[in-house]
Image (spheres, coloured by chain):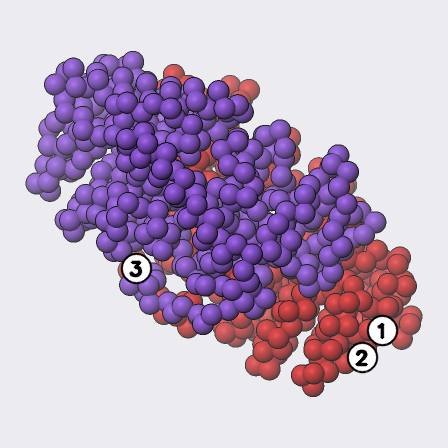
Chain colours: A purple, B red
Amino acid sequence: MTYAEFQTKPEPEPLRLADLETPCLLLDADCMDRNIARLRQRLDALGVSLRPHLKTAKSVDVARRVMSSAAGPATVSTLKEAEYFAAAGVRDMIYAVGIAPGKLDKVLQLRQKDVDIAVVLDTVEQAQAVAAASRAAGQAIPALIEIDCDGHRSGILPGDAASLLAIAQALTDGAELRGVLTHAGASYGARTEQALIEAAAQERRAVVQAAETLRAAGHACPVVSLGSTPTAHFATDLTGVSEVRAGVFVFFDLVMTGIGVCTVDDIALSVMATVIGHQREKGWILVDAGWMAMSQDRGTAKQPVSQGYGLVCDSTGTPFGDIILADANQEHGIVTVRPGSGATLPDLKIGDRVRILPNHACATGAQHGSYRVVRGTSDIVEANWQRFGGWS
Amino acid sequence: MTYAEFQTKPEPEPLRLADLETPCLLLDADCMDRNIARLRQRLDALGVSLRPHLKTAKSVDVARRVMSSAAGPATVSTLKEAEYFAAAGVRDMIYAVGIAPGKLDKVLQLRQKDVDIAVVLDTVEQAQAVAAASRAAGQAIPALIEIDCDGHRSGILPGDAASLLAIAQALTDGAELRGVLTHAGASYGARTEQALIEAAAQERRAVVQAAETLRAAGHACPVVSLGSTPTAHFATDLTGVSEVRAGVFVFFDLVMTGIGVCTVDDIALSVMATVIGHQREKGWILVDAGWMAMSQDRGTAKQPVSQGYGLVCDSTGTPFGDIILADANQEHGIVTVRPGSGATLPDLKIGDRVRILPNHACATGAQHGSYRVVRGTSDIVEANWQRFGGWS
């Protein structure tokens, strides 16, 4: 589907929540707006710009609300995101997954449409490929060197000057060294405010050290980019940093609640489901939201409080308290009392509706084709914002 | 997107594997055809018909190959599946998730288009709602009573004659009692051939007992339906059963391999990915397939051999052996040697391609918009079969 086809999908007429088929994905736009304002205020105070990661929402409507301008800046996780958002007017993007040489043609096609998209890499081989593609196209592709600030995934260690300079050198042969970038993925394992503050400080130190190494060797390094939702909300000093990337903050989720970055009230996404059965002697209520609607993300299982496949709320979005989606098959969910909590199962009848808060907004969002937009406890569905998925 | 729009998507011109962008979903059609033939032969020998579950593939192209005829029979997990397959000519379906009363309008709309779709239920409240909707529409909606053969999810216990008869009685007030249905979901926990054979026998006993109870009370009970991929492949006697439902067998996956229903060579689905980095001192290869491409299904984590997020194969689909996708972020996968195996990490360079076999075909398939159809080790991409998702 092209972006044009995607956009021509008509908006439905105004609906009430009761009119929606289940399962479906609800987005509380008031809650989202508060989340966006909160991070923006924080980063304004710290003097850095926000380059939101659009991989969470994959929606032009959400992107326009979270970006500083209709042209960006923004972060993307796939070139399909880059193409969709470019078609919607975004002009400043970082494709924040290590570049495969075979994807450079698509990057160049975007750049030839006046989209300033930069790539990310952490090997000399990639830098050579980017330089070669730049020379062949007669256009310098900008690249950021990925820095490994906490060992969780990819990147060059900040003290590995030899690798940093070898990559920078390889880029000079036709490409452009745009800067350095890191992501404190290990911050998801932090459990205290002090640990979050330290994860943010470590993230900053790593990327600033790498930038200084490059500059000392004569390389311009204009962009110093870092970010994760936890560190973005706990950084106390971002000296030397030019921009912060974060994605999941726009919706928040139970994993972020478990880390202590937000409260359950800040979670803007929920899955509405209908009661379809009971197994009373087991204390089970069956609903029509299984893992296909919730995703199989069990991110809270590693936290002190496991939320199963999601935290169950009443039809207005208020948590019952210690009632979780304890198990899930493809289209069946099993609602129970959280083991050990001593809570009482709510009296829900066949056909009653609940809302289920997700463990991981990026994963749950990806299971749905659109966001049904609501505000607070109102039962009016204001809009149906399309979202996309896939890679090509 | 309507089915008509869905169908108008043009097929691309013939491609080679190397032309495909990654990550993408490959389907080995030779392998799929063998899997279909295997189960069909088994069920023919046992004298029962196959009502394949189309929730795994969600593809008209796959459905036409797995069904006995273009008109069905088939099983679906959502009414969107029912609508798509109805538009493609399927006329005999069971919607095998407990019916929510709010969905009966859609069921009736399908029935008014000559689609014989039956619903499933396990409460008197649902039976009353189905009867009321039938009376209001002047058309008897057929319903199957769900039987709980192993306690894993929903259904009436086979010995609970009072509940069975109360539901049957409620249906007589306008609806149609089509039969009984069960699913041996607990068979996924079986670890030996004997346990699988016993799970199949228990599944049969439960549903046949329920049918006999209903018939003894004077209710016709023409359909006696059971199935799961494990029990379908290990049942030794299906006396009294009219049809078998199974879904994942069409593609198979690592969970089924771990149970012992198939071998790795029988897995028809894989995700093709590209190497995008190394962390050599950690023994990691980074690829561009993360959980968005693989799903977050960790079904093998509960089995004796955990496959992480998937088993890694070379570009022709041959497993390296003990090389797994050990961890995954949204668009990053970390390939490592399986802990404790003593295997050697393959020498893969930036830009090299691998194929990754999935834990759970239903879940991995759902992350993709189409199947790129290949055969064996050929590098020709024969077709691009669209698949759909969502609920409305």
Is the C-beta separation of discs 1 and 3 under 8 Å? no
Q: Position of residue A359 (x, y in %)?
A: 55, 41
**Circle 2 Cα neighbour tier, 10 Å, few/some/many (<14 / 14–19 / ≥20):** some
Between B162 and A258, the one nearer to me in the picture: A258
Categorize mark 1 by other alpha carbons within 10 Å: few (<14), some (14-19), many (20+): some
Q: Residue at x 28, y 14 (%)?
A: A160
Image-quadrant location for residue B162: bottom right
CA gap between label 2 and label 1 equals 7 Å
Q: Which mark is residue B169?
A: 1
Q: Provide the secondary structure element on which disc 3 rests.
A: helix
Which residue occupies 83% across, 49% down? A281
The chain letter for the residue carrying disc 1 is B
Question: Position of A83 compared to A353: left or right?
Answer: left
Q: Of all residues shown, which one is farthest toward the left?
A: A138
Q: CA distance from mark 1 to mark 3?
A: 53 Å
Label 2 chain ID: B
Numbered label attached to residue B173: 2
Q: Secondary structure at mark 2?
A: loop
Please give the label number shown on residue A3.
3
Report, in whole angstroms, how far the alpha carbon at label 3 lies from the one at label 2. Answer: 50 Å
Residue at horizontal 28%, vertical 31%? Answer: A47
Give, as a three-letter code, the residue at label 1: Gln
Identified by mark 3, the residue type is Tyr
Q: Position of residue B364 (x, y in %)?
A: 50, 47
| SS at badge 1 | helix
* Dot 2 and dot 1 residues touching (CB under 8 Å): yes
Q: Is residue A49 visible?
A: yes
Residue at figure coordinates x 49%, y 58% from the top left = A374
